[in-house]
Image (tube, grey):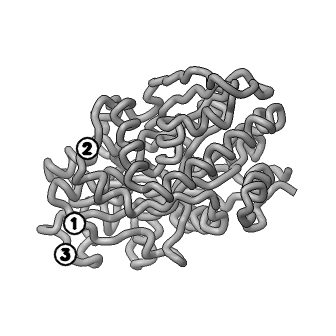
Amino acid sequence: MPATRTTLRRGLAAAAALPLLIGALASCGYGSEAKNDEKKVAAEGEKLSADTVRLGYFPNLTHATALVGDQEGILQKELGGTRLVPTTFNAGPSEIEALNAGSIDIGFIGPSPSINGYVKTKGTNLRIIGGSASGGVKLVVNPAKIKTLDDVKGKRIATPQHGNTQDVAFLHWISEKGWKVDAESGKGDVSVIRTDNKVTPNAYASGAIDGAWVPEPTASKLVSDGAKVLLDESDLWPDKKFVITNIIVSQKFLKAHPDVVEAFLRGAVKTNEWINANPDKAKASANAKLKDLSGKALGAKVIDAAWPSIRFTDDPLAATLQAQADHAVNAGLLEKPELGGIYDLKPLNKVLKAAGRPEVSDAGLGVK
């Protein structure tokens, strides 16, 4: 497996210094949420080579494969007597840190943290082993202040975190418009305000921001507060598909427990199949899990608007990961990375073949 040749620019492995708006709010939960939900071992099925598999994911709709697979017991059923132990996170860097520390074995995570984690460890720790979701990201704005895409210039637009997937996408879009923004400070023709998704609705309500480039359900929460969808990021991609959530695993766990990884992927594939066959039930299931995790379910107005914009897919859409890495380089957030070996799709393709489904591609970025 080739080692990476470059490193991240300063500060990308963690959030950079945030604007004054959220400097005082940094303690409001950005990072590991520290809620562990240990599941009971399935009554049937022999234990695999590991006693437990520790899973990390976000309480976001773009992680609904994990939400639903956990809520409905589909993941646990495929793991049999191997116990699934989930932990939720609020940010990619904290989940990558947990994977690097050996605190979790498998995780659902966005493309930018996947790339950053792979580069930071010089390709020695994580592998992407599957896809989970595409889409579910929107530019939403205050319609009184922004009526057209050109009106975004000069305004204050939030992204979830410095260097995260949506931050990269927004900075790339700004560049495509011919506008200039300093990637580190967020200052320029547009003011990019890095704001925790939990805080963004309050920042919008107070007038501290004029809009946000954010994932679901934050986008639809803002719309329920009077914002307007100005752009769906899916419209910027070929076939309207781009990876928003990957499944990753530590290389150590993959090597030691290939049977567990295969069983987990079988559960993820079956979960996505159930979601796509039962969208209304799946939406309710995801919302029930969100309520379990946070104590509060999403309102019908929010989840009904958010859910249709997310596609659930086993395909990691590897070509779009490379494109997102290129966007980060062009935005000045990342030096050109060597991503060869970031994927190992052999276990997933084995599961898909057994289900009579076509294999998926690693776009030339797989393990040799």
Q: Residues within 10 Å of mark 2 (few under 14, many from 20)?
A: some
Q: Label 2 near label 3: C-beta < 8 Å?
A: no
From the image, tell me which residue sits under label 3: 147
Q: Is residue 233 left or right of residue 65?
A: left
Whether residue 326 appears in this view of the structure is yes
Q: Position of residue 313 (x, y in %)?
A: 57, 59
Instruction: Single out the mark in the foreground, 2 or 1.
Output: 1
* 238 is higher (above) or lower (below) than 167: below
* 183 is higher (above) or lower (below) than 293: below
Of helix, strand and loop, which one carries label 2? helix
In the image, what residue type sits under mark 3?
Lys
In the image, what residue type sits under mark 1?
Lys
From the image, tell me which residue sits under label 2: 21
Of helix, strand and loop, which one carries label 3? loop
Which image quarter: residue 148? bottom left
Q: Residues within 10 Å of mark 1 (few under 14, many from 20)?
A: many
> Disc 2 and disc 1: Cα gap in Å?
22 Å
Residue at the image point whose x is 48% and y is 32% from the top: 88
Q: Is residue 258 left or right of residue 174?
A: right
Q: Nearer the viewer, residue 17 or 227?
A: 227
Instruction: Single out the mark in the foreground, 3 or 2.
Output: 3
In the image, what residue type sits under mark 2?
Leu
Of helix, strand and loop, which one carries label 1? strand
